[in-house]
């Protein structure tokens, strides 16, 4: 779901303009420049979902859960993350 970066309303038109405050919410005009590099999420491999719940430790192999699919907590289901340039 896309929200307005100014008033947090979810009422956006097809051009990502907020119907309440008129803010332009185009993804490429936000905080990140168009030169930002997005990469496939390494945790869910670009699927947006994972089988292991986020509250289960990484080295734990067995758990009990009624839900079989969970939203990836690294990319929040968006399937991509912003590449960081760490040196």
Image (tube, rainbow, N blue to C red):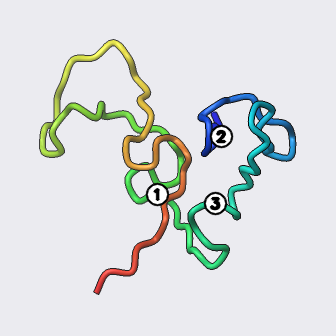
Rendered residue at 76%/51% (across/down):
24
Query: In this rendering, would 14 be left or right of 54?
Result: right
Q: Is residue 19 left or right of residue 72?
A: right
Residue 64 in the image, given as x and y percentages of width and height = 21, 17
The one of 4 and 82 positioned closer to us in this rendering: 4
Circle nearer the N terminus (3, 1): 3
* The C terminus - image quarter: bottom left
Mark 1, secondary structure of its residue: loop
Q: Nearer the viewer, mark 3 or mark 1?
A: 3
Of mark 3 and mark 2, the one earlier in the sequence is 2
Instruction: Give the mark count.
Output: 3
- Report which residue position mark 1 lands on: 41
The tag earlier along the polypeptide, 1 or 2, is 2
| Residue 59 to residue 33: above or below | above
Left or right, 53 with reference to 19: left
Label 3 CA crowd tier, 10 Å (few <14, some 14–19, many 20+):
few
Q: Residue at x 40, y 73 (%)?
A: 84
Task: Say which mark, if any, is on residue 4.
Answer: 2
Q: Disc 3 designates what residue?
A: 30
């Amino acid at each position: 779901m896309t929200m307005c970066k100014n008033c947090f309303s979810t009422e956006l038109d097809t051009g990502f303009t907020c119907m309440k405050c008129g803010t332009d919410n185009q993804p490429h005009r936000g905080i990140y420049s168009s030169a930002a590099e997005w990469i496939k999420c390494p945790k869910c491999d670009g699927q947006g979902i994972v089988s292991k719940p986020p509250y289960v430790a990484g080295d734990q192999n067995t758990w009990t859960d009624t839900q079989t699919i969970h939203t990836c907590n690294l990319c929040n289901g968006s399937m991509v993350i912003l590449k960081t340039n760490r040196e």
